[in-house]
Amino acid sequence: MELNTILHVEDDESIRVIVEMSLVDLLGFTLFSFDNGKDASAAVEGLQPDLILLDAMMPSMDGLQTLAEIRKIPSCQSIPVVFMTARVQQSEKKQYLEAGAVAVIEKPFDAANLGNELLSIYDQCHQGV
């Protein structure tokens, strides 16, 4: 399995732009960006991304709520989800992982290395598959 398509959910436009440059311009990924969890949850089944990059803190529907909605869709239950957050206390990181995330990336993140970090996470999820 290969990482090609990423669904990114982030309410901060400046971060969406940086992520797009990091993933599309530098590494050629296909990226679908949403500024809220509701729209992303509604679109995810039709997009069938290889990985979901999800902001933890968003207005109206936060990352955990978005993940819960996505996991209700049978065809989306095994898509790896990576949270991005500025709040990385161990208790919060544990909460994200227990909710089904495969990794947590701290903001601010290394834009030049984001794609390689996601590739590594994705490969770890699919070892032995």
Image (spheres, helix red, strand yellow):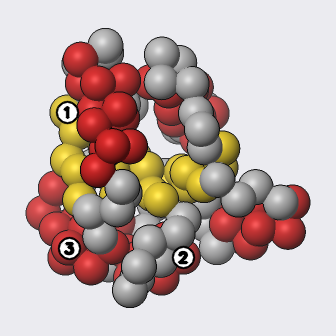
Residue 6, image quadrant: top left
- Residue at disc 1, secondary structure: strand
- Viewer-proximal residue, 99 or 14? 14
Dot placed on the residue nearer the N-terminal end, 2 or 3: 3
Answer whether residue 12 is visible to the viewer in this image. yes
Give the side of residue 98 with respect to residue 70, left or right.
right
Q: Residue furthest left?
A: 46
Q: Amino acid at mark 3?
A: Asp
Residue carrying label 3 = 39
* Residue drawn where x is 23% and y is 51% of the image: 33
Q: List the single residue furthest toward the right.
A: 90
Q: Residues within 10 Å of mark 2 (few under 14, many from 20)?
A: many
- Element on which disc 2 rests: helix
**Residue at mark 1:** 30
Q: Residues within 10 Å of mark 1 (few under 14, many from 20)?
A: some
The structure residue drawn at horizontal position 64% and vertical position 73%, both measured from the top left corner, is 99
Q: Is residue 14 above or below residue 40?
A: above
Tell me which numbered mark, 1 or 3, is placed earlier along the sequence: 1
Residue 50 visible in this rendered orientation of the protein:
no
Residue sitting nearer the eye, 24 or 50: 24
The image position of residue 127, as x and y in percent, is 60, 32
Q: Amino acid at mark 1?
A: Thr
